[in-house]
Amino acid sequence: MINNLKISAMFPCYNDGGTIIKLVRDVSEELNKYCVDHEVIVVDDCSSDNSRELLSDEAVSNKKLVLVFHEKNKGYGQTILDGMKTAKFPYFFYTDGDGQYSVEDISNLIQAMDEDTVLANGYKISRNDPFYRIIIGKLYNLFMKFFFGVKLKDIDCDFRIIKKSVFEGETFFSTSGTICVEMVKRIEMKTDKIKEAPVSHFEREYGRSQFFNFKRLFFVFFHVLKLWHLLIAKRK
């Protein structure tokens, strides 16, 4: 473990009113056990449910909570980047705001880290999703490993701690879900100081996935091609 650890924990939020407040409180409770200081950032990507009202009410009494509200929907990738830009501490944790991961498992990542660790990434013990999503997830992992040479066990596991200094001077291309591949690949191109740890994955109890529809999948595929050209083809 790292001594005197300080973490900015971040959740992207889009219509996650049924889960986001519990996640904010639970991650603070967990980080209090391991960190000398922390903050919790929520970047709301123009939700149309009651997420903003709930978050604003929570921020009145929760001094660790930092809110960023997008006035128009900017996409998952831009939401992550805005959270990282807002973060004031050297380590940046993020996971999704839908509650499919237990933030208690952040302890697995923290305990796996040492002073040299640049990325601590989770991998799902088992995936609790509909069958078609499990198949798409496996194909996505295979695709990214083959075309990008990603070494992580589970690139589709958005549960990670990043040492922010690894991205100093970087300009990112992705504003969609391809941000995860881009960040991981940029890290792997610089260092092998990466740790992995198992995390639990649960069925979605609130809301619906914004990723798994044909229009969005086509958009992501197009972005993956452009990202491959930027990170792989041009460098060759």
Image (tube, rainbow, N blue to C red):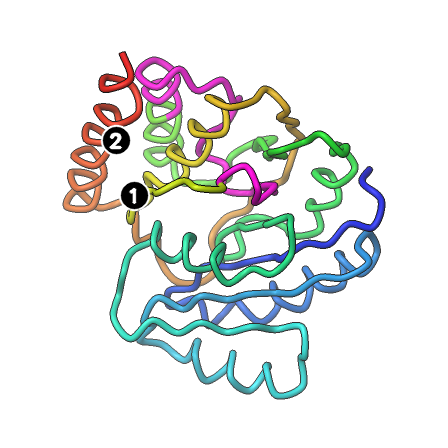
Q: Residue at x 29, y 49 (%)?
A: 175
Crowding at dot 2, Cα within 10 Å, few <14 / some 14-19 / many 20+, comes out as: many
| Pointers 2 and 1 in contact (C-beta within 8 Å) | yes
- State the image coordinates of residue 112 (x, y, percent, origin top left): 75, 32
Position above or below: 87 against 108: below
Residue 97 in picture, x, y percent from top left: 49, 59
**Front residue of this view, candidates 203 and 233:** 233
Figure quadrant of the C terminus:
top left
> Which residue does the image show at 29% across and 75% down from the upper left?
71
Residue type indicated by callout 2: Leu
Q: Residue at x 65, y 65 (%)?
A: 39
Direction from residue 125 to residue 210 in the image, left or right: left
Q: Which residues are magenta?
A: 141-167
Which disc, if any, is residue 174?
1
Hey, what amino acid is under mark 1? Ser
Residue highlighted by disc 2: 227
